[in-house]
Image: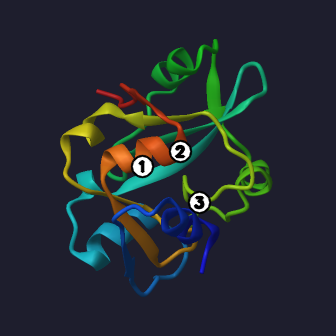
C-alpha cells in the first residue's frame, strides 16, 4: 500500500489499480507502463518535478509520449524559468523514487500543473507510487486531489 493509494482510498473516489512487471529499470518508465498495460500513451501521465527560478519545486503532469515545454511550465507557475529538479531533491520532496513518482500522497504538497489535454479524457493513469503500479482515475479527481491547475505544457 503506497501513500498514493491511501490518499485515493481516503478521498473515496472511483479509482483502479493496475500492476505490471517492470523492465530493466532504465526507463522510459511511462512508455513501459502504457505498453505493458495496453493503454494509449496519451492516457498515461508522467509526473515531473521541476525547480523554478525562485527555488520552489513544482509538478508537471503530461502524457508519457510528449515533452514538457519548460517555458510554458514556468509561465504557468509564475516563474521566470524552470528546470528538471535533481533526483534527490525530487525524492526528498515527494517521498518517491524517479520512475515511481506519483502526484498523489506526496510528503509535501507541491504546486501542480496538469497538461490541459487530460481534461478531454474519461480516465487518466498516473504512477501509484512505485514502478509497476498505476492508478486510473478521472482527470477531475486527479486535479482535485492534487490541487492542480490545467495548463498548456507541451512542446509543439
Q: Residue 27 carries which label?
A: none
Secondary structure of residue under mark 2: helix
Task: State the CA–CA distance, disc 1 to disc 3.
Answer: 14 Å
Count residues near mark 1 (Cα–Cα under 10 Å), then give few for <14, some for 14-19, many for 20+.
Answer: many
**One can see residue 128 in this view:** no
Q: Which residue is drawn at 55% across and 59% down?
A: 102
Residue with the mark numbered 2: 146
- How many angstroms separate mark 2 from mark 3 (CA)? 13 Å
Look at the numbered discs 2 and 1 and tell me whether their residues touch, using CB distance below 8 Å. yes
**Of tags 2 and 3, which is closer to the observer?**
2
Q: Which of marks 2 and 3 is nearer the N terminus?
A: 3
Residue 97 coordinates in the image, percent (x, y): 67, 65
Q: Using the rendered view, name the quadrant where residue 32 is placed.
A: bottom left
Q: Is mark 1 on a helix, strand or loop?
A: helix
Above/below status of 133 relative to 40: below
Asked if labels 3 and 2 touch by Cβ distance under 8 angstroms, the answer is: no
Is the C terminus in the top left, top right, bottom left or bottom right quadrant? Answer: top left
Q: Can residue 152 be seen in this view?
A: yes
Percent position of residue 81, x then y: 63, 18
Amino acid at each position: 500500500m503506497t501513500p498514493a493509494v491511501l490518499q485515493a482510498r481516503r478521498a473515496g473516489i472511483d479509482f483502479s489499480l493496475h500492476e505490471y512487471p517492470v523492465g530493466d529499470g532504465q526507463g522510459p518508465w511511462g512508455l513501459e507502463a502504457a505498453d505493458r498495460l495496453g493503454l494509449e500513451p496519451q492516457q498515461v501521465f508522467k509526473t515531473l518535478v521541476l525547480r523554478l527560478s525562485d527555488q520552489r519545486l513544482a509538478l508537471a503532469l503530461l502524457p508519457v509520449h510528449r515533452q514538457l515545454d519548460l517555458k510554458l511550465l514556468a509561465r504557468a507557475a509564475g516563474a521566470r524559468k524552470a528546470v528538471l529538479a535533481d533526483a534527490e531533491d525530487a525524492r526528498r520532496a515527494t517521498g518517491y523514487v524517479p520512475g515511481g513518482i506519483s502526484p498523489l500522497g506526496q510528503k509535501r504538497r507541491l504546486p501542480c500543473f496538469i497538461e490541459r489535454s487530460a481534461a478531454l479524457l474519461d480516465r487518466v493513469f498516473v504512477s501509484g507510487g512505485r514502478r509497476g503500479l498505476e492508478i486510473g482515475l478521472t482527470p477531475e479527481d486527479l486535479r482535485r486531489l492534487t490541487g492542480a491547475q490545467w495548463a498548456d505544457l507541451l512542446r509543439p
